[in-house]
Image: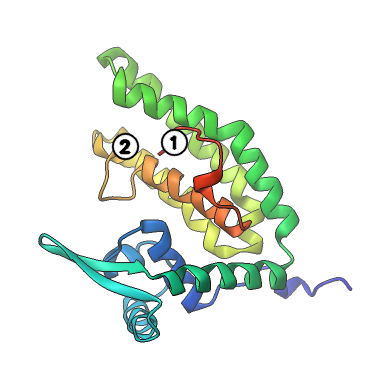
Amino acid sequence: MIPDRSDLKRRSSDELLVLHAVRLAGFADSGAVVNRVDLPASSVGDTLRGLEGQRLIERMAFADSGGWILTDAGKSRNAELLREELEASGAWPVLHATAEDFESSVNPRLVRVITEWQLDRADNSVEVLLRELTDLADALSALMGELAARLPRFARYSRQFSAAVEKARAGEDQWVAGVGRLSCHIVWAELHEDLLSSLGRDRSTEPRSGDR
């Protein structure tokens, strides 16, 4: 049976979006979750409280910051929701093809650029590296188009990567590989994790590619 075209763009449930955002961030306060989902802050807050009540996430405090992490039950529920979404959307072939193209084409380029930026960034190479990041932003946008049409939660990656590149080109170097923000490096690493986890693959068992 051919699916109705209206089903091809399927928004993920609030539960999956928020739970998965916590997983991808590793440790996330409300603001970090809002930055990773296309939901109002009030909806994010309500969903976080509901997940905490179900013991799928738990609140942790480190120094002056506080946020949520997944519990073991939350990790299991997250994996279950990802499986259900993939089955309902029929997006497995597109997801698999996108993940394969990501691994073989754009990911090695990003790893090289970030490594050069962090370890051997001479003044005369900065513009070259920023130009390569701009090219990668265009490549990522093209790569993610079909998958984002099937699973809209993936649309944020090309948008946020391009935004980080623009800030870096404006002279804010921390947007290339900085932590505590959705820098090029962080967005890319979360996309890599998202592709693998959505396919039911554990990144800890994957061959290391050096992108995080």
Is 196 placed left or right of 173 in the picture? right
Depicted 12 relative to depicted 163: above or below: below
Residue 40 in picture, x, y percent from top left: 37, 76
Q: Residues within 10 Å of mark 2 (few under 14, many from 20)?
A: many
Q: CA distance from mark 2 to mark 1?
A: 11 Å
The secondary element bearing badge 2 is classed as: helix
> Which residue is found at the position 42% from the left and 67% from the top?
37
Three-letter code for the amino acid on which mark 1 is drawn: Asp
Does residue 168 appear in the picture of this structure?
yes
Three-letter code for the amino acid on which mark 2 is drawn: Ala
Residue, far right:
1
Q: Earlier in the sequence, mark 2 or mark 1?
A: 2
Q: Nearer the viewer, residue 210 or 131?
A: 210
Depicted 162 relative to depicted 131: above or below: below
Q: Quadrant for the N terminus, please.
A: bottom right
The secondary element bearing badge 1 is classed as: loop
> Which residue is found at the position 55% from the left and 52% from the top?
202
Label placed on residue 22: none
Q: Quadrant for the C terminus, please.
A: top left
Label placed on residue 177: 2
> Which residue is found at the position 65% from the left and 73% from the top?
84
Label placed on residue 211: 1
Does residue 38 appear in the picture of this structure?
no
Residue 29 in picture, x, y percent from top left: 26, 67
> Which residue is found at the position 57% from the left and 37% from the top?
139
